[in-house]
Image (cartoon, rainbow, N blue to C red):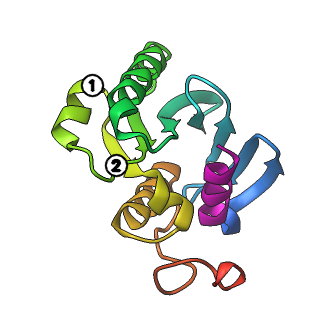
């Protein structure tokens, strides 16, 4: 979870106005305040303040583990969390999970509420199609430009191998 939150922080870095261990405050392009919080149910929440009212935007569930035989259980756990988040008024539901070797149609049956699926290994590595999609969707959800601050795919120079 901390590594996922670090990846999120890197995407939003230029727009962060306050950074706490489990919460980021961002000023978006419209001048509104957006909060990204690390917790449980959902693992990460994106909330935006509009005219002094907080709106629940995106609930993100992170399901670790690479055991293919247990993937459907993890997707089912994500579904339970997303259903709780829906009751809280969230509108969009993302699941970050190990996708390699899995049939996405089956996973989608296990978590029908999930609106976006991202591969955890690509998000952690900060490379690949799921990383690029995650980065762009995150920027859109927060309301900031979606350009890659590195100018190309992959990790920032400080993470170069």
Whether 82 is among the magenta residues is no
Q: Point out the image quarter for the C terminus.
A: bottom right
Is residue 116 among the parts visible in the rendering? yes
Against 67, residue 148 (above or below) is below
Against 32, residue 15 (above or below) is below
> Measuring 45% from the left and 62% from the top, which residue is drawn there?
122
Residue 83 position within the rendered picture, expressed as x and y whole percent measured from the top left:
40, 16
Give SS at disc 2.
Answer: loop
Considering only order in the chain, which callout, 1 or 2, is on the residue closer to the N terminus? 2
Q: Give the quarter of the image for residue 45.
A: top right
Q: Would residue 135 appear left or right of 149 to someone viewing this image?
A: left
The reply to whether dot 2 and dot 1 touch (C-beta < 8 Å) is no
Seen from this angle, which residue lies furthest left? 105
Q: Mark 1 points at which residue?
A: 110
Q: Residue 33 carries which label?
A: none
> Measuring 41% from the left and 47% from the top, which residue is drawn there?
98
Is residue 112 among the parts visible in the rendering? no
Residue 92 position within the rendered picture, expressed as x and y whole percent measured from the top left:
38, 35
* Distance Cα–Cα, label 2 vs label 1: 13 Å
| Viewer-closest of 11 and 155 | 155
Residue 18 position within the rendered picture, expressed as x and y whole percent measured from the top left:
81, 52
Residue 109 position within the rendered picture, expressed as x and y whole percent measured from the top left:
20, 27
Q: Residue 99 carries which label?
A: 2
Q: Would residue 61 appear left or right of 44 to someone viewing this image?
A: left
Q: Give the residues drawn in magenta, as a range.
A: 1-12
> Measuring 63% from the left and 80% from the top, which residue is drawn there?
156
Q: Point out the image quarter for the N terminus.
A: top right
């Amino acid at each position: 979870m901390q590594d996922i939150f670090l990846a999120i922080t890197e995407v939003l870095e230029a727009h962060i106005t306050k950074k706490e261990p489990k919460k980021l405050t961002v000023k978006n392009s419209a001048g509104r305040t957006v909060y990204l919080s690390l917790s449980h149910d959902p693992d990460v929440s994106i909330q935006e303040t509009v005219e002094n009212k907080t709106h629940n935007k995106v609930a993100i569930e992170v399901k670790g583990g690479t055991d293919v035989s247990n993937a459907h259980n993890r997707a089912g756990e994500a579904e339970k969390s997303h259903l709780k988040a829906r009751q809280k008024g969230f509108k969009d539901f993302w699941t970050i999970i190990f996708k390699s070797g899995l049939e996405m149609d089956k996973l989608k049956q296990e978590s029908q509420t999930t609106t976006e699926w991202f591969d955890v290994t690509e998000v952690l590595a900060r490379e690949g199609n799921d990383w690029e999609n995650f980065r762009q969707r995150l920027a859109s959800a927060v309301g900031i430009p979606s350009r890659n601050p590195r100018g190309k795919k992959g990790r920032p120079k400080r993470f170069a191998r």
